[in-house]
Image (tube, helix red, strand yellow):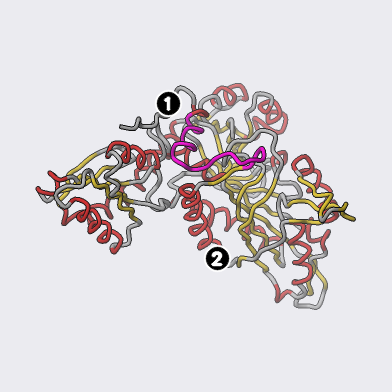
Amino acid sequence: MAKAPVLTPQAEDFPRWYQDVLAKAELADNGPVRGTMVIRPYGYSLWERMQAEMDARIKEAGAENAYFPLFIPESYLTREAEHVEGFSPELAVVTHAGGKELEEPVVVRPTSETVIGEFMAKWVNSHRDLPLLLNQWANVVRWELRTRIFLRTSEFLWQEGHTAHASEADASAYAHRILLDVYRDFMVNVLAMPVLVGRKTRQERFAGATNTLACEAMMGDGKALQMGTSHELGQNFAKVFDISFQDSAGAQQTAWTTSWGTSTRMMGGLIMCHGDDRGLRIPPRLASTQVVVLAIRDEGGVVDAVRRLGDELRSAGVRVKVDDRTDTSFGRRATDWELKGVPVRVEVGPRDLAAGEVTIVRRDTGEKRQSPIAEVAHRVEMLLQVIQDDLLAEATRRLEERTAEVATIDEAREAAATGFARIPWANLGEEGEAALAEHAVTVRCLQRADGTVPRSEDEDGVVAVVSRAY
């Protein structure tokens, strides 16, 4: 009998546990070039589900998908000084192609504000052309020195939205809509991950932005992970690329733009938020396989029964796999599905079948219950919703229990060793932010006391959420 894979316990070595899950749940491998990754089929099936759920919400917000080039003329980036300065250490630049030196080097896109700005300028002429709401699913390259699969790689997959608006108010409202109605809604209701929303400090803003909004989540070890950002770009890029329009009075105006993105970093967040010492735990709404029906042994019509159950569940709208590989031990197969985090297992053996029953196993709690075969589909459908709700509730309890309200910088630093701290921004300020950074503690976002997004960091009562982060 093959030995079941063993994971390093989280409490012993959380980073090692993470690497073990990547390998043993067959999610991804390191690519041949430092900092790149190969996403394996099971891992990619989860990313496809993320794409589908996010894409539906992005389109509901009015944006349309497009595609822009991987290669960007270097001159495009140098037009916006703050932008190129922010990205210059991470740029990959092509200087030779086709056997000769290029007249102008081209940059492998780190993000697409510049190239999309060039084309927005061509497509926007009148106020009737606005708002222009674009999104693309693509890969980007940011040459990272310290890499970890999904969390920080030199090449990663993402969506990046770019919009142009007739007014600052409209651009700001849309950036907030993406943050709350697209990103937060997806993260809470599909990924079952509670997120804190807020503004980034001046120090943490996206290069060239006037305001950066973010979703921040707590991982199983208490550290923060930035899950998505939405940027108000003001008129910075619009002026550089001449994104202008004629208003209803016939006057020429400069547009206001936004950009926003999420990436395969969310895969890392999914692992670290919900995973346990037995592997992944996938929320049912995200799971590419919600239920696996396992044949314990090929006796007494078991294989035919699991196939019928699979068809019945599939007809009920459940994403299901039938595992009838009885030439591999049941224990090994059950452990593999547990590692992969499939929310529900339905196990069928000869004795159970003879009694007209099956065993239903919850991945999140390990709880096992017997069920009459005739009631499996109904019970599984209800159980999937329970698991979705319970995973969100568990992650929410951890966030609440490991978030401390503090008053001083020393208290914030101490609390950040195990979780988040909330400290009045008036007590911290930019000097305190710099002091915390010396201890690898960063301001994740600025919020109002009630957790909503402030219009400015100068508002009364603004609170800074600080923590260690990935």
x then y, percent, for residue 396: 42, 40
122 magenta-colored: no
Does 45 sit left or right of 2 as displayed? Answer: right
Find numbered disc 1 in the image and state the secondary structure of the residue it sits on. loop
Q: Residues within 10 Å of mark 2 (few under 14, many from 20)?
A: some
x then y, percent, for residue 166: 72, 67
x then y, percent, for residue 246: 79, 74
Q: Residue sitting at 85 percent across and 54 percent down?
A: 75
Res 9 label: 1
Task: Tell me the quarter of the image containing the C terminus.
Answer: top right
Q: Amino acid at mark 1?
A: Pro
Task: Tell me the quarter of the image containing the N terminus.
Answer: top left
Find numbered disc 2 in the image and state the secondary structure of the residue it sits on. helix
In magenta, the rendered stretch is 17-36
Does 118 sit left or right of 134 as displayed? Answer: right
Q: Amino acid at mark 2?
A: Lys
Q: Nearer the viewer, residue 418 or 330?
A: 330
Task: Say whether residue 450 is visible.
Answer: no
Q: Nearer the viewer, residue 261 or 169?
A: 261
Task: Say whether residue 33 is visible.
Answer: yes
Q: Residue sitting at 57 percent across and 53 percent down?
A: 179
Q: Earlier in the sequence, mark 2 or mark 1?
A: 1
Q: Nearer the viewer, residue 449 or 194?
A: 194
Q: Residue sitting at 61 percent across and 58 percent down?
A: 137
Question: Label 2, on which residue?
Answer: 59
Q: Is residue 35 above or below residue 136?
A: above
Farthest front residue in view: 327
20 magenta-colored: yes
